[in-house]
Image: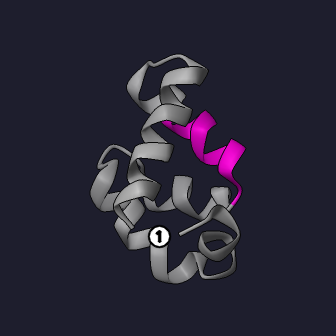
Amino acid sequence: MNWDQIEGQWKQFSGQVQAEWGRLTNDDVAVVEGNRDRLAGRIQERYGVEKDEAHRQINDWLAKH
């Protein structure tokens, strides 16, 4: 699956995103609105990881879906 599909179906995937990154709040997920960079930023904030690590986690999650 590619990010364009995730972005287009964000409401369906938002629950899966919260399941993967449990520290993200409903507000975090709403603000992301399918934007990959915003998701990476929220992961950075909530988990205290670097930008590259946040993007790696997103890539790993995408590979599973």
Query: Which residue is depicted at the point 47% across and 70% down?
Result: 14
Q: How is the image coloured?
A: one colour
In the image, residue 25 sits, relative to residue 12, either above or below, namely above
Q: Could you classify mark 1 by the number of other residues whose Cα lies within 10 Å: few (under 14), some (14-19), or many (20 or more)?
A: some
Which of these two is toward me, 64 or 13? 64
> Which quadrant of the view contains residue 41?
top right
Residue ID for mark 1: 14
Q: Nearer the viewer, residue 57 or 40?
A: 57
Give x and y (percent) for residue 11.
54, 80
In this image, 49 relative to 16: left or right? right
Q: Is residue 56 above or below residue 34?
A: above
The amino acid type found where label 1 is placed reads Ser
Residue 58: percent from left, percent from top: 49, 45
* Residue 18 in picture, x, y percent from top left: 36, 59
x and y percent of residue 26 in the render? 46, 62
Is residue 38 positioned above or below 6 on the image? Answer: above
Judged from the image, the secondary structure of the residue bearing numbered disc 1 is helix
Q: Is residue 38 magenta?
A: yes
Chief secondary structure of the magenta span?
helix
Instruction: Please tell me whether residue 52 is drawn above or below residue 33 in the rendered image.
Output: above
Is 33 displayed left or right of 58 in the figure?
right
Q: Which residue corresponds to the image point at 61% horizontal and 65% vertical from the top-left?
A: 2
45 part of magenta stretch? no
- Quadrant of the frame with the C terminus: bottom left
Total marks in image? 1
Q: Magenta span covers which residues?
A: 35-43
